[in-house]
Amino acid sequence: MDKLRSMEVFVAAVDAGSFAGAAQRCGLSAVMVGKHIRALEQMLGAALLTRTTRRHALTEIGRRYADQCRTILAQVGEAESGAEAMRATPRGLLKVTAPVSFGSEVLSPAVTDYLALHPDVAVELNLNDRTVDLVEEGFDVAVRIGPLPDSTLVARPLRPYAVAVCASPAYLARHGTPRTPADLARHECLEFTGWLPQARWKLKGEKDGGFVAPGRFRANSTAALRAAALNGFGIVMQAELLLADDIAAGRLVPLLADWLPTPRPMHLVYSRDRRATPKLTTFVDFMLARFG
């Protein structure tokens, strides 16, 4: 029998003073009440009640056990109430992981907007360019850029991760505007060292399908390369999301639109759970509205 249910029936019998009273309170038969209490006595190896033809009385062990059962049942009730409250209102810690550049420059400001909407939620943001195992490492949700392998995770598509090639108006005034990938050989092309070798300044060429430009300034930080471009040193190739504000403000000018790489897919992924908490469902909805 379910031990917790047997404890509930035992306490009901103590409070009611009889099996019949406990049966009425618990929606059971008096016979079933007796079975629950006998199951506890067998488990404990001691009598909890002494029975007469009309009533029953607690043994010393039964009295102490009843007090302990009340404490345990109260704690279980508090835990259930807390869980119900968490399911009704977004609250608690949400652990999120994302690629470094996207997470630091785009996702982080969005997270603060989400937190402003949900004051009972805390977010722990882990930025990492490797593929994190959500279940093994205890994360609730992840942003993934690129094709997804087959998995049991739920994947919600976000806006494709498009690339932009840009330079400042001052740089273009000094060095001219490149019209084709081949023109980049005469320009300062800022290089991100985190690129895979086959992705280094890879554009759609007119004949060979690609072009690798030289670069005198390399960095493992997209923020550092963006700053160099804004300072007029060279041409930067980065995710459009990272440069969108600068493009909109005219600080950077988009270039080579016809030769840009094909946008990569971007997804929000999380474990399949039919009982997902409000903190997760509201975050998913927020991300789809912001980046979908």
Image (cartoon, rainbow, N blue to C red):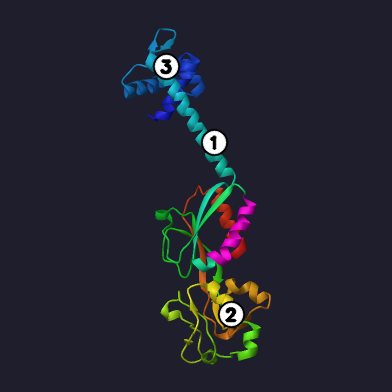
Q: Which mark is residue 81?
A: 1
116 magenta-colored: yes
In the image, residue 178 sits, relative to residue 285, either above or below, namely below
Q: Which residues are magenta?
A: 103-118
Identity of the residue drawn at 47% across and 24% down: 70
Q: Residues within 10 Å of mark 2 (few under 14, many from 20)?
A: many
Q: Residues within 10 Å of mark 3 (few under 14, many from 20)?
A: some
Identity of the residue drawn at 56% across and 52% down: 281
Residue with the mark numbered 3: 63
Q: Quadrant of the C terminus?
A: bottom right
- Front-most of residues 50 and 197: 197
Residue 258 in the image, given as x and y percentages of width and height: 57, 85
Looking at the image, tell me whether mark 2 or mark 1 is earlier in sequence order: 1
Q: Magenta segment, principal secondary structure?
A: helix
Residue 31 in the image, given as x and y percentages of width and height: 41, 19
For the residue marked with disc 1, what is the amino acid?
Ser
Give me the C-alpha separation between circle 1 and circle 3.
Answer: 27 Å
